[in-house]
Amino acid sequence: MEVSEREFFVKKTALDKIRELKENSPALWGKMNARQMVEHLSEYIEHANGKRKMQVLTEQEKLSAFRSFLFSEKEFKPGTPNSQMPETPEQPRLESLEAAIEELEINLYKFFERFAGKENETENHIFFGPLNYEEYLTLLYKHVLHHLKQFGLT
């Protein structure tokens, strides 16, 4: 998939699908409800847009394997564990699903703004190491698609 296709998916298609969610939309797997999932995506996009800085936790000798997965056609499997998330999801921070979606849109806008004209600069990802614009866009595509599938939105 070309970058422009991933951009369109992340900017438009995914947001349109996320707007179909309701507070009580059931997940097909996992422990997060709809609002928690949207807040989760928004927080991870804050890492991509540079608002929240991360230390890379993946050991150097494992980083190549992690990045190989990232740039492959493989998807995140349902229920893929995230060692940085608590066993029980935190209560939503925001007052409504609509507020969470609005925050997500703002963070996505800031992501595209952050890398405008600076596509080769990098921001750290906790598992995949330093990622430039195209690499982060690949990750965002996979991550968002994973959560859309979680809520039956694909």
Image: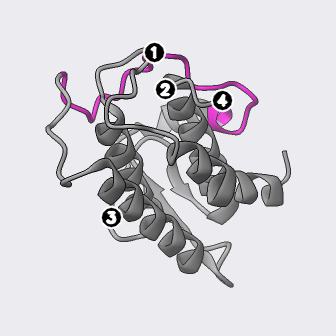
State how far apart marks 4 and 1 are (Cα). Answer: 12 Å
Q: Residue at x 40, y 55 (%)?
A: 101
Secondary structure mostly seen in magenta is loop
| Crowd around label 1: few <14 · some 14–19 · many ≥20 (10 Å) | few
State how far apart marks 4 and 3 are (Cα). Answer: 31 Å
Please indicate whether residue 145 sits to the left or right of residue 39 in the image.
right
Task: Residue type at mark 2: give it.
Answer: Phe
| Crowd around label 3: few <14 · some 14–19 · many ≥20 (10 Å) | some
> Which residue is under mark 1?
28
> Which residue is under mark 3?
53
Task: Residue type at mark 1: give it.
Answer: Leu
> Which residue is under mark 4?
154
- Secondary structure state at the residue bearing disc 2: loop
The C terminus - image quarter:
top right
N-terminal label among 4 and 3: 3
Please indicate whether residue 85 sits to the left or right of residue 93 in the image.
right
N-terminal label among 1 and 3: 1
Please give the range of residues in magenta.
68-87
Q: Where does the image place residue 153, in percent across and percent down from the top left?
A: 59, 31
Is mark 1 in CB contact (under 8 Å) with mark 2? yes
> Which residue is under mark 2?
151
N-terminal label among 2 and 3: 3
Task: Residue type at mark 3: give it.
Answer: Lys
- Secondary structure state at the residue bearing disc 3: loop
The N terminus - image quarter:
top right
- 76 w.r.t. 55: above or below: above
Please indicate whether residue 133 sits to the left or right of residue 85 in the image.
right
State how far apart marks 1 and 2 are (Cα). Answer: 6 Å
